[in-house]
Image (cartoon, rainbow, N blue to C red):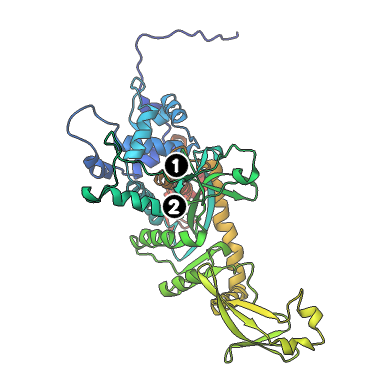
């Protein structure tokens, strides 16, 4: 007989929310081991003593965690998910007949709480991973990714500045001058207005391609001034932030995370990220000994900083680096190059280049005039041969020596397998692809919460104790009686019957 389910609402229900959440549900394990009660003390100074009660700080962090855990980036979508999910309601402590916080409450609370609070939650989850043996701390891999900002590239406006700074100074002097020395007034006792300084501005909607040209130096977003225009192969030119991630090589746990301006080069963000990593690891008695990074992090300043910290760095040298120049030999003692024909290229001058200088070496015109290979060596109308190399060439040479070893090649290959999958996972499965708030601090919180979610998933899979299902527990009881009844001649049980059953039934 075919059954037909009739929808008949009840007036009264006998229902317990906790009975609907499985015993092995991930939210139960998080609730059991992640203690967020410290948030009450940390946030008490942000609230007054009277008025309507705010959202519970622990509930706020848990709701944010559920969003990143389920790759939900919208506050409205997060509220809908928590409202119709019994496991989420149980995790938050809200019964089925209680109203959850609205999306605007989440937005305001996120702005209220400082970045330091999110860093403490990150360190708390990192501590769970360390206690579970998932973090070694010795070797860290660094990488970055673009996070879409909550701003349109069409919102960029030119930064308006005064053409004549002296005009501004003159206006300030007039405002603070002695009344007797002020300029003459008109017949109606109004001061004679000085001509205003012209403002330099560009209409971004103009058809003139020169006027429509935009850059981070001359333009900024009207909706999010901290967002920066950036481009990357495979991504459209748009407004972004830079996410900086440090991943431990043992099990791929994120040890440090931060957000920075998208137009800031990676090597400039490295000191701040490395400081966070060292601080997070020092709390657990661990220290960084090696770092793995690509060429975007490799500069003279970075190599020197690693040497001062006693850290061995494995970073690809910049693309323009050349260890040797074909046909030329460099002599450190004389600080000069010698070509294959015996001509000497002596040191000429220093040429500033970004954060370092280039050394310029030039030959003599008389030596190159009758050279048999002049046409192959000198191009154009030049009469001399010029070579340059960086002031940090010795450091780059040391790095190249390190990378040419078997260990160095293995480290470069290992870096890609450690950190790049983590970046992809954060973007596509932990909600880090786009930040819906505005400002660099909000982007920093966004990257930290995505990293917390990733580490919790890693801990749940590899480090968290897994509760036994009811069926497995019953099988254990039946099997324990069988194993204990076996004769001693069958097998020796050095670990006891529980160990034997757990590793055969599960």
Question: How many numbered discs?
Answer: 2
On the image, the x and y values in percent for residue 276 come to: 39, 58
Cα distance in 3D space between marks 1 and 2: 85 Å
Is there CB contact under 8 Å for labels 1 and 2? no
Viewer-nearest residue: 499 or 406 = 406
Q: Is residue 183 left or right of residue 252?
A: left
Q: Which residue is mark 1?
A: 476
Per the rendering, the mark at residue 164 is 2
Q: Is residue 410 above or below residue 397?
A: above
Q: Position of residue 297 (x, y in %)?
A: 53, 63
* For residue 390, above or below residue 114: below
Q: Residue at x 26, y 42 (%)?
A: 43
Query: Which comes sooner in the sequence, label 1 or label 2?
Result: 2
Secondary structure, mark 1, is helix
Q: Nearer the viewer, residue 255 or 211?
A: 211
What percent of the width, then of the height, locates residue 121?
35, 47
For the N terminus, the image quarter is top right
**Image quadrant where residue 283 sits:** bottom left
Question: What residue occupies the far left of the structure in this picture?
Answer: 49
Q: Horizontal placement of 499 versus 31: left or right?
A: right
Residue 378 x/y as whole percent: 76, 78
Q: Nearer the viewer, residue 24 or 217?
A: 217
């Amino acid at each position: 007989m075919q059954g037909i389910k009739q929808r008949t609402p009840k007036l009264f229900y006998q229902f317990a929310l906790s009975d609907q959440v499985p015993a092995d549900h991930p939210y139960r394990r998080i609730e059991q081991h992640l203690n967020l009660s410290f948030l009450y003390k940390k946030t008490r100074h942000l609230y007054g003593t009277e008025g309507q009660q705010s959202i519970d700080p622990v509930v706020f962090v848990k709701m944010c965690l559920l969003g990143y855990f389920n790759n939900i980036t919208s506050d409205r979508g997060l509220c809908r998910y928590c409202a119709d999910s019994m496991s989420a309601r149980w995790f938050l402590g809200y019964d089925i007949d209680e109203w959850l916080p609205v999306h605007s409450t989440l937005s305001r609370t996120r702005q209220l709480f400082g970045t330091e609070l999110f860093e403490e939650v990150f360190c708390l989850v990192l501590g769970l991973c360390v206690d579970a043996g998932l973090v070694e701390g010795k070797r860290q891999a660094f990488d970055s990714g673009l996070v879409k900002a909550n701003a349109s590239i069409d919102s960029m406006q030119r930064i308006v500045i005064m053409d004549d700074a002296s005009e501004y100074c003159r206006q300030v002097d007039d405002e603070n001058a002695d009344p007797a020395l002020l300029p003459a007034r008109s017949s109606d006792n109004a001061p004679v207005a000085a001509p205003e300084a012209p403002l330099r501005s560009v209409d971004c909607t103009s058809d003139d391609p020169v006027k429509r040209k935009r850059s981070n130096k001359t333009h900024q977003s009207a909706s999010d001034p901290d967002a920066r225009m950036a481009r990357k192969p495979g991504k459209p030119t748009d407004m972004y932030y830079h996410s900086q991630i440090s991943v431990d090589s043992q099990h791929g746990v994120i040890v440090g995370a931060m957000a920075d301006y998208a137009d800031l080069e990676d090597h400039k963000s490295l000191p701040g990220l490395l400081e966070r990593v060292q601080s997070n690891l020092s709390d657990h008695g661990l220290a960084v000994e090696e770092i793995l990074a690509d060429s975007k992090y490799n500069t003279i300043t970075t190599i020197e900083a690693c040497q001062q910290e006693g850290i061995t760095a494995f970073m690809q040298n910049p693309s323009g680096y050349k260890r040797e120049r074909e046909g030329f030999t460099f002599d450190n003692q004389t600080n000069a190059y010698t070509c294959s024909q015996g001509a000497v290229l002596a040191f000429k001058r220093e040429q500033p280049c970004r954060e370092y200088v280039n050394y310029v070496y030039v030959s003599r015109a008389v030596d190159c005039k009758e050279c048999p290979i002049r046409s192959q060596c000198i191009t154009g109308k030049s009469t001399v041969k010029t070579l340059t190399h960086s002031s940090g060439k010795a450091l780059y040479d040391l790095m190249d020596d390190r990378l040419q070893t078997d260990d160095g090649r293995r480290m470069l290959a290992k870096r890609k397998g450690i950190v790049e999958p983590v970046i992809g996972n954060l973007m596509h499965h932990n909600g880090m692809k786009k930040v819906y708030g505005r400002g660099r601090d909000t982007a920093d919180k966004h990257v930290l919460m995505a990293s917390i979610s990733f580490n919790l998933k890693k801990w749940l899979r590899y480090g968290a104790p897994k509760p036994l299902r009811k069926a497995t527990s019953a099988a254990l009881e039946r099997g324990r009686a069988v194993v204990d009844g076996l004769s001693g001649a069958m097998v020796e049980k050095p670990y006891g019957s529980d160990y034997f059953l757990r590793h055969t039934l599960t």
